[in-house]
Image (cartoon, rainbow, N blue to C red):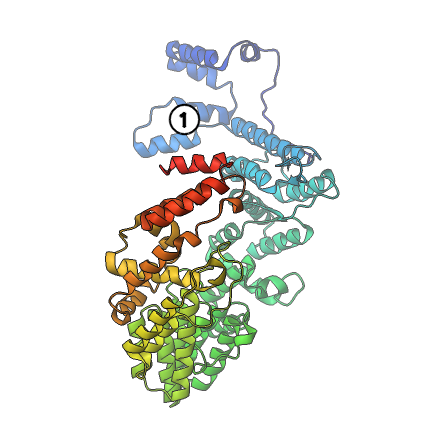
Amino acid sequence: MPKKNQIFYEDNVKVQSSLGSRILEGLAEAEICQLLDSLFAVLSDEQRQTAFVQLEADTQTTLIQIIAPSQTGEQAKTTERQATSLAKLAQTWSELWREWNEIITEASQSEGKYIVQEESWEEPYFDDCALVEDLEAVAQKMKPLVETAFTNSFSYAHGFAANLLEAESEISDGIADWMEIRDGINLQPNITHCLLEWEWLGVQKQGQDAFKLAKQIREWEEKLFHISLDDDAVIDFFSDLPDEQKKLVLAGMTAERHSSLWKYDLENTFSYWHLFYMEVLRQFATPEIYLNNLRATISQEWQNGLPVIQDLLAKQEYRESLTVIQETLDALLKNKPDLNPWTPENSLLFVTVGGFSYAPGNWEKEKTLLRYYQQAVRELGEIERVNALEIQYITFECCYDWSSMFKAFAEIPVNKDTQQALFTSWRESIIKRGTPYKYSGLYTNPKPLDTWWLHWLLDSITTKEKGHTWFKQQIIEWLENLPGEQGQMGGEYSVLHLLTKDLTEIKYQGKSPYPKFYEVVILPNQLSTRDDISRKTYLQEYAPPDLWERVMAYWQANLHNFVPRPDSSQSSDYTKNAQWMSALKELAPQNYDSLLSQWKVQHKRRPNLWKAMRNLGLD
C-alpha cells in the first residue's frame, strides 16, 4: 500500500470519553438524528448561541448555514454546497484515500480480485480495465474535494502523481513474473483531472506557471511504464487554463521542442501534447508559424495538408501547392506502396483508398483535396488533368450510381487512354464488390470465374458493338450450359444466386412466389450491395423477358442436387438439411418426394434428422 502522507489538517476537538463520544458509540445514526432534531426543537436562539460559541469557528459557520432558512432558490443552492464542515470534508477525503489504497493493495496481490481466469484451461491475466474502473469511481468522488483538500492541507498531501508512481511499482512487483499488463493501465478522465488539478495547485503555490506543470507531468510520464493519462482529459484541462497561462505553455514548449523530453511528443500527431500544442499555435501564433508546423506533420496525418494547400492557393502559389498536394497524396496512400505514385489519369482515387471496401462515408476531406488539386492545375493551364480530376470527384459522389458514372466517362473530355484507365478502374471495382462470397461446403473444386454475367452487362452497356442482343445471347448460353452438379459449379453457384435475387426483386419486388426457397437457398440479405438499384435497373433493361422463368426452371430441375447431405452435418444438427428440404418441396415437389425416399433408406438411423424434418411439418 502506498505510504500515507502526514496529516496537515487536524480537528482541534479532542476525542475524549465525553458525553458526545459515548452517544456516538451507543446510538445508531438514525437515533442520533432523532436526538438532534428533538434538542434543536426545544432550544431557544440564545441557548443555541451559547452552545455554538464553544465550537470551532468553521463548525459554527457550517451549523448556522444548515439551520438558517434560505430566502431564495440561489441561496438554497449555495447553502447546500457549503453546509459541510472542513472536519467532515477531511474525514471524507481520508476515507476516499483509504478506499483508493485498498484497491491498489488488492491489485498488488498475485491472486487478488484483478487476476482473472475466465476458463480453467486458460492462463489468468491482469484485469487492468476493472482496476481503472474501480479507481475512477473513487476519483469521481474525490474530484469536487481536490481544491479544498489541497488548500486546507488534508491528508495525503503528496497527491496523485506520487501515489500512482508507487502504485505501478507495487502492482508490477506483486503480480506473477510471467503475467503481463498487456494493454497498460489507461487512466480515465476523473483520475486524470484529479492528478492534474492537484499538481497545478502545487505549481501555483510555488509561484510557477503552467509550463512548469506541463514539464512536471512529462517528467512524471517518463518514469512510468504501464500507466498513462486520459488523452482528452489532459487536453481539456490545459485548454481550460487562462489564455496567459496557455501562452506561457506555448512559449515553453516552443523553446524546448527539440529537447529529449519534448521532441517525440510534440512531433507525434497521436500525442495529446502535440494536439494541445497545435491548438495553442493556432490560437496565439502567426498563421505562417502554425501552417509550417502543420506541414511538418503531413506524412503522419494527411489531412493536415489541406489547410496548407488552401493557404498556398489563396496566395496564388500554384507550383508550391502542387508540391504539398503530392506530399498529401503520398501520406494518404502510404499504406498502399504498390498503388503509389498515383496520378489522376491512371486510376480512380476512390478505388485506390478503398472506397468500395468501407462503410458509407461522406469523403469530404478527399473531395476537398481533389478540388484543391483541380484548382491548382486549372490555374497552370493543365486542362486534361482538370478534366481527369472532375471524373475523380464525381466518383466519390456517384460511384454506385451507374448512370452518373457512364455519363461522366462519356461526356467529360479526356484522352482515350485516360478514359479507358479510369473506366477500367471503376468497372473492375464494381465487379469485385458485386461478386458474392463463395458458399462454402456446397462444391468441392471451385474453378476460377474470370467472367460472368455482370461483366457482360457492363460491356453491353458501354460497347456499341455488343448491346442488348449480345447480352441476351451470353446469359442464355451460360444458363443453358450451367452444370447441374454441385461439384462442377465453382464460382458460378454464387453469381447464380445474385442473378436469382436481382430477377426476383425486379419481377416481384422481393416477394418471391417461392418464399422458403428465396430465404433459405438464395439468402438475399447476404447479397445486397450499394449499387443494387443501378445493377437491377440495367439488368431489367438488357435481360430477355423470360430470364426469371429460365433461371427458376434451372433451380426446379437441379435444386435436389444442392440439398446438404445429412452425413455431412456436424454435431447431429440437421436444421439446415430440413430447411433445404422444405424449400425443395415448395419448388419441386416431385424431386422432393424422390430425395425423401432415398433419405428414408440411407439415413433411417438418424433420429435427429427426422425430428428436424417433423419440426418443419415434413414427412
- Mark yes or no: residue 236 visible: yes
- Mark yes or no: residue 580 visible: no
Given residues 64 and 268, the one toward you in this image is: 268
**x 36%, y 57%: residue:** 557
**x 47%, y 58%: residue:** 486
Above or below — where is 307 with respect to 383?
above
**Crowding at mark 1 (Cα within 10 Å: few <14, some 14-19, many 20+):** some
On the rendered structure, is 378 left or right of 224? left
**Residue placed under numbered mark 1 in the picture:** 65
Above or below — where is 576 with respect to 317?
above
Specify the quadrant that holds the C terminus. top left
Residue 215 image position (x, y, % from top left):
62, 56
Please state which amino acid type lies under the numbered disc 1.
Answer: Gln
Specify the quadrant that holds the N terminus. top right
Above or below — where is 425 with respect to 300?
below
Regarding mark 1 in the picture, which secondary structure is present there?
helix
Residue 275 image position (x, y, % from top left):
51, 61
Residue 218 image position (x, y, % from top left):
62, 55
Circle count: 1
**x 37%, y 61%: residue:** 498
Given residues 58 and 330, the one toward you in this image is: 330
